[in-house]
Amino acid sequence: MSFLQAIILGVVEGITEFLPISSTGHLILSGRILGLAETEFLKSFNIAIQSGAILAVLVLYGRTLIRDSRLIKRVLTAFVPTAVIGFIFYKLIKKFLLGNPLVVVVALFLGGIVIVVFEKMYQRRPHSPDPAGGITYSQAFLIGVFQSLAVVPGVSRSAATILGGLSLGLPRRTIVEFSFLLAVPTMLAATGYDLIKSAPAFSLNEAGLLSAGFLVSFAVAVVSIKFLLYFIKRFSFELFGYYRIAIALLFFIFYH
């Protein structure tokens, strides 16, 4: 991997992390397009640079978290299901799912259909205008269960949590912002656990590539978060569903 390729992947990560289109899936497909070998370093790189996008959340929402202990407790409650499943199936996920373009294509395609159908059927329900801290513990836990589906590359962590929250009757902005915050412990845990396992084998050059991807993903993610908050005021997620279907079909035709 060159530094230019690391920067490209950082841009891809920053754009896609919080959109319901799967950042991990896009990183895997982008790596295939760039001709990168499916090495253990590439798999770790795709996990670790997501922490750059998480830093963007802390910069934008750090004060909100610090000031609201109830919100922190709900975020941690939602984190539990993914933490348990990720820990139990870590080896399986990294060996057989990460780096598998076919899994990504299928997940993107099916997930796109789900998003389109969901948005066509979705009707707003009466709800409280409370911020994310108004989410109950039971709702938070169920959102975490939805998020755990995203251990399959291509499903999309944000899509799973957002559609899960909407199905529970939460306002669109509330669940989108909660999804941002839930990404913090989820991706920090995933990155930290993987680096503990893999970092000792990284060369100095590989550490530099990780740093470049991290910084780029952070800068781009700040813009991506603001874009999504602007987008949801005016549109549903149906367009993202069609995008997922189109990308899956194009990749299957030209790169399979």
Image (cartoon, rainbow, N blue to C red):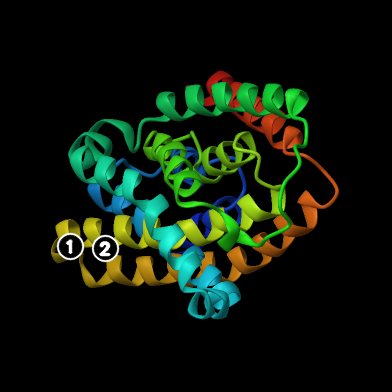
Q: x, y (%) of residue 181?
A: 51, 62
Q: Do the residues labelled 1 and 2 touch (CB within 8 Å)?
A: yes
For badge 1, the amino acid type reads Ile
Left or right for 92, reference 61: left
Residue 40 in sight from this viewpoint:
yes
Give the x, y percent position of residue 95: 22, 36
Labelled disc at residue 196:
1
Residue 5 visible somewhere in the drawing:
no
Q: What residue appears at the point 65 percent right and 45 percent down from the top-left corner?
A: 170
User: Which residue is located at x 42 percent, y 51 percent?
Assistant: 78
Quarter of the image with the N terminus is: bottom left
In the rendered view, tell whether residue 102 sits above or below residue 1: above
Query: At which x and y percent is residue 34?
Result: 48, 44
Q: Is residue 194 left or right of 62 when viewed as pictured?
A: left
Residue 125: name its quadrant: top right
Q: Name the residue under label 2.
A: 192
Going 45% across and 65% down the picture, which residue do you hit? Answer: 213
Secondary element at image label 1: helix
Q: Position of residue 253 (x, y in %)?
A: 57, 19
Tell which of 93 and 30 is nearer to you: 93
Tell me the amino acid under the disc marked 2: Gly
Q: Which mark is residue 30?
A: none
Task: Please name whichever residue, 197 or 141, is drawn nearer the observer in this view of the structure.
Answer: 141
**Disc 1 to disc 2, C-alpha distance:** 6 Å
Q: How crowded is mark 1: few (under 14 residues within 10 Å), some or many (20 or more)?
A: few
> What residue sits 27% from the left and 36% below the top?
93
Quick check: 91 left or right of 142? left
Density class for disc 2 (Cα within 10 Å; few <14, some 14-19, many ≥20) is some
